């Protein structure tokens, strides 16, 4: 049996769990979310080939970075703040020709509750609200509402 080295995979280590997280939206009361989706960024590729070159390939350069929209889902509870309040407020802001954006902090924690990774989302604003769907045959499903958020960028901090 060989000794473990620093580069060897330890069979007793597990990847980080994804179920223990916290989402804080600037200026909103604390809301417990069930799902966070859409933390994605992508760099476009610019291809160029001058017509007088002898090379038969295009050169590639990095272009602009774009970010996908983020979707937050949470259970709908009576008497508790919900996503529709932010949506209604933002719809009023748009009608008033104002554009207030928020900062969102998404923190992934370990089993002890310590933050392992934090994403700071900048320039966030809601673009779509979906209330809970109704289904007479779903006898054991929770009512879940969701909000889709566009944002300008995010940074990642590993603890």
Image (tube, grey):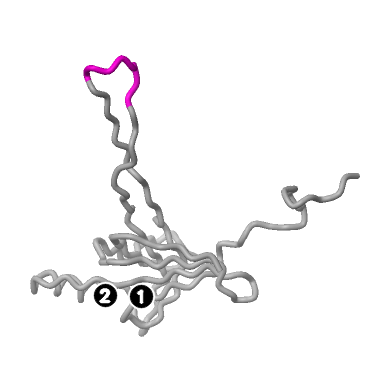
38 or 31, nearer to the observer: 38
Q: Determine whether, in the image, residue 33 is placed left or right of residue 88.
A: right
- In the rendered image, residue 103, in percent from the top left (x then y), is placed at 33, 72
Task: Give SS at disc 1.
Answer: strand
Q: Is residue 130 magenta?
A: no
Residue 25's mark?
1
Q: Residue at x 34, y 17 (%)?
A: 55
| Residues at discs 1 and 2 in contact (Cβ within 8 Å) | yes
Q: Residue at x 33, y 53 (%)?
A: 67
Q: In the image, is 6 to the left or to the right of 95? A: right
Establish if 38 lies above or below 55: below
Residue 48 vertical position relative to residue 69 in the rendered view, above or below: above
Viewer-closest of 75 and 88: 88
Q: Crowding near pointer 1: few (<14 within 10 Å), some, many (20+)?
A: some
Q: Quadrant of residue 47?
A: top left
Residue placed at 86% from the left, 49% from the top? 3
Q: Which residues are magenta?
A: 51-58
Front in this rendered view, residue 143 or 31: 31
Q: Is residue 148 above or below residue 96?
A: above
Q: Quadrant of residue 126?
A: bottom left
**Which of pointers 1 and 2 indicates the residue nearer the eye?**
1
In the rendered image, the vertical position of residue 67 relative to residue 18, given as above or below: above
Query: To which residue does mark 2 refer?
Result: 86
| Residue 53 colored in magenta in the image | yes
Disc 1/disc 2 C-alpha distance (Å): 10 Å
């Amino acid at each position: 049996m060989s000794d473990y080295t620093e580069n060897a995979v330890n069979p007793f280590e597990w990847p980080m769990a994804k179920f223990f997280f916290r989402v804080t939206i600037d200026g909103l009361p604390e809301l417990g979310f069930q799902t966070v989706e859409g933390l994605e960024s992508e760099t476009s590729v610019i291809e160029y080939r001058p017509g007088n070159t002898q090379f038969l390939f295009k050169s590639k350069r990095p272009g602009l970075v774009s970010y996908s929209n983020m979707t937050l889902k949470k259970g709908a509870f009576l008497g508790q703040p919900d996503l529709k309040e932010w949506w209604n407020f933002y719809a009023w802001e748009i009608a008033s020709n104002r554009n207030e954006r928020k900062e969102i902090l998404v923190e992934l924690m370990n089993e002890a509750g310590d933050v392992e990774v934090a994403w700071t989302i900048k320039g966030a604003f809601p673009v779509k609200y979906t209330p809970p769907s109704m289904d007479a045959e779903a006898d054991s499903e929770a009512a879940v509402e969701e909000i889709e958020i566009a944002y300008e960028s995010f940074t990642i901090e590993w603890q």
